[in-house]
Image: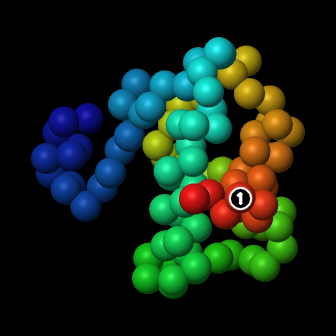
Amino acid sequence: MRIVRADHPEVTIILPNEKIQVRPGDDVRSLIIPYVAVIRQALDSKKVGVWKGYTAECRIRQVRRLLTHYFYFHEGCISEQDFNLLVEDLLFVHKAG
């Protein structure tokens, strides 16, 4: 991996052990709130990227995908349905800060 990164600095390879580890019992909400807020703000302002779809499901899926770049969710820490509801709550109800 070091060789790939040294020869191709434009390539970013993030291994699971380099991500923030989320284990069963961790407070997933408090861990992801700042990240969801930054992602939402960046996509709303269109400075970094754009929303790929206008429905809630599309936006939740896009934020979930981006969160997987920063976090490694261990099995049993949160179900897929609960994670979707959490992201939806942070995006649309509480506006993530």
What residue does disc 1 label? 94
> Which residue occupies the foreground of this view, 81 or 65?
81
| Quadrant showing the N terminus | top left
Mark 1: amino acid: His
Q: Is residue 95 left or right of residue 8?
A: right
**Which quadrant of the structure image shows residue 91?**
bottom right
Q: Which residue sits at x=58%, y=67%? A: 40
Q: Position of residue 55 (x, y in %)?
A: 84, 73
Q: Percent x, y for residue 21?
A: 49, 25
Q: Residues within 10 Å of mark 1 (few under 14, many from 20)?
A: few
Q: Quadrant of the C terminus?
A: bottom right
Q: How many marks?
A: 1
Q: Is residue 76 left or right of residue 11?
A: right
Q: How is the image coloured?
A: rainbow
Q: Is residue 78 above or below residue 47?
A: above
The answer to whether 70 is drawn above or below residue 91 in the figure is above
Residue 19, percent across and down?
A: 42, 33
Q: Examine the image and state in which quarter residue 88 appears.
A: bottom right
Q: Is residue 66 visible?
A: no
The single residue placed furthest to the left in the displayed view is 6
Q: Is residue 24 toward the left or the right of residue 42 in the image? A: right
Across and down, in percent, residue 28 comes to: 63, 32
Give the residue drawn at x 66%, y 51%. 64
Q: Residue at 56%, 43% (x, y): give it.
A: 32
Kindly state the secondary structure of the residue where label 1 is placed. Answer: loop
Q: Nearer the viewer, residue 6 or 95?
A: 95
Q: Is residue 18 above or below residue 76?
A: below
**From this viewpoint, which residue is outermost toward the bottom?**
46
Q: Is residue 65 visible?
A: yes
